[in-house]
Image: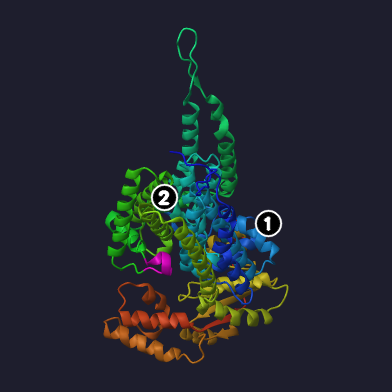
Amino acid sequence: MLPPADPSPADDAGTPPRWARWWPLLVVVAGLPLVVLVVALAQRTWYPTGDLAQAELRMRSLPSHPPLVGAAGRITDAAGRQGNHPGPLMFWVTWPLYALLGRSSWAFEAATTLVNLAWLATSVWLVRKAAGVAVAAGYVAVALVLVGGFGLDGLSQPWNPWVALLPFTVLLVTTWNALDGWRWAPVVAVASGSYAIQGHVGYAPVAAPLVLASVVAPIWLARRRARRPEPGTSGDDGQVTVRLRYREAPSWVLPTASALLLGVTAWSGPIVDAVRNDPSNAQKLASNFGSPSEDPVGVVEGAKLLLRTAAPLGAWVTGGLDLHASIVPGLALLLAWAAVAAVVARRGDQPALVRLDLVLAASLAFGLFATSRIFGAAYLYVFRWAVVLAGLVVFTLLWGVATLLPRPAPGLTRRLGAAAVALLVLGSVATAVRVSRQEIPYDYSWKAEEVLAPRTAAALQPGTRYLVDWEDPVYLGGVGFGLLLDLERRGFDVGSPAPTATAVEPRRVRCPGGYDAVLTAVTGPLAIAAWKAKPDARVLAESGPSDPGFDYQATFDELQRTLAAEGTDLDPAQLERSLTLVVLSPAAPAAAHRLASRLVSEGVPTAVFLQDPAPVAGPVAHTVANEPCWK
């Protein structure tokens, strides 16, 4: 049941038609939206904040201080210490492009997009390798929908759950090729699987079994072929001699050894971290998931989450997900896919499609286990890999239906092919326009940073050591992280307090006595007023809502009245500190959620204050979380 190397339709001589040799154009069609996005982003100004600022701080640590672990996450060990995602590959792989393009924030966006382009191109090549050009064209159509769903955010923003999406796609189609015996599948699987898992630990339950399958399957198939008897010859005594073809057995040795070497290299950062640090990040991850702080959601709720992402026109198309939406559309899609897959398997004339269906079925089973173990708030980013599975389920369903339909006449086939090519090109252009016109997300914080950072920098003195701190319950320190990044980029000697060690790396932590002045980003009009009343604090910069016509105070007062009418009576200071909680709480009244979201998205006023440091009593500490902090 092994298909030929290129199962494209062949002419009478058995060679692929000339049009099949133009398959690299499919890569161009698929990649055009990402290339256009890189150019469009070069025309814009962007100030990373929050997690994105933390990511660029790690990029700036290379090459002299390479990060050993991934981004800081919602990970806490039994002792309450924050942990990181498994590994630093997203930084290591992206850094050469980042450095080449000028080490700016745009360079980080562009480098992230270009790495995603490489993964996307690899996936197109692998689909063509497994099933031919016609099927690869169908895959490109589905990939364009996925890319449109990812949007500017998922394609260019260096947020760790996003950067794992396309490597995970590559892993799926690599496993598909591995089941066909492709001997180099282990190398590609280790590369793509490591990238995805290191980016976000939520990919591990689905990606790790696929990597294992991609390593084992080519070895098993090669050994099986090697033991297949060759036809023998009959001797004088009438006996038939059978020779075993062991000469093929070594074909898997070099790829497997290469995959092992690549795996050790890819995971060298976490390995070094495990040797150097106690507790290591691996120990924190084991503690977090081995003893979760809350009960997992369970199989039933996990299945509902998967079904909601599997809606035919759901998250894989739109990029968003209503976690309370109906499960019926997703259930209908999966039932239709399973029915068509069963018919195709029974016919036995589409082995490549059957293999991909098996990969997806196994991945959905692993995915159900993963979603059933979610604890805490179930945001889409925790299991974003599910949108890729949904897209590929739609792809294989359409492919399966196409194989069951009567084959059209040759003339009609050519016309349909020409129409399909035209639609692909049109879809590529439309997707490019769609993603390149989208706004850079989280503008409520980065636009505030655009105002605050230059004004703050203009008021600072070169040669002075600054501690960057924040009082920011609204954006969870987002503006503070962005300010730290911007000032470091401008050449100032800056660091942050010990509790931020996991987020900014311990080397950026400053000990008491290790700085000459303190910068504090304060969010909220009431908090700003209280800081302005401090005799030792001087305001350096202020920002307000991004829309000058937005009446912040009137909206805030309306929110307070709405909550009071529902039985939640908060004074103004309490409410100011609780805006994000109202946005995130599923129990918040719809009107309150809308008003709080408007306040947060328009931009809560923020100010930066300068103070002298508090006097240091006694000896100065020189370690933070078993790491040196800089005096």
How many labels sit on residues? 2
520 up-or-down from 218: above or below: below
Among numbered discs 1 and 2, the one appearing first in the sequence:
1
Q: In x, y percent, where is residue 591?
A: 32, 83
Q: Quadrant of the N terminus?
A: top left
Reply above or below: 226 against 64: above
**Residue located 43% across and 90% down the image:** 553
Q: What residue sits right under mark 1 in the picture? A: 63
Residue 130 at x, y = what percent?
Answer: 49, 47
Q: Is residue 164 left or right of residue 458?
A: left
Classify mark 1: residues with Cα within 10 Å, few (<14), some (14-19) or many (20+).
few
Q: Residue at x 55, y 72 (%)?
A: 49
Could you say whether the residue bearing mark 1 is in a helix, strand or loop?
Answer: loop
Judge the density around disc 2: few (<14), some (14-19), many (≥20) Cα neighbours within 10 Å.
some
Query: Which residue range is magenta in the image?
Result: 313-321
Q: Is residue 315 magenta?
A: yes
- The verdict on residue 584 being magenta is no
Between 153 and 318, the one nearer to me in the picture: 318
Viewer-side label of 1, 2: 2
Residue position for label 2:
205
| Residue lying at 47% horizontally and 37% vertically, measured from the top left | 216
Q: Is residue 472 above or below residue 221?
A: below
Q: Amino acid at mark 1?
A: Pro
Q: Position of residue 441 (x, y in %)?
A: 51, 74
Q: Amino acid at mark 2?
A: Pro
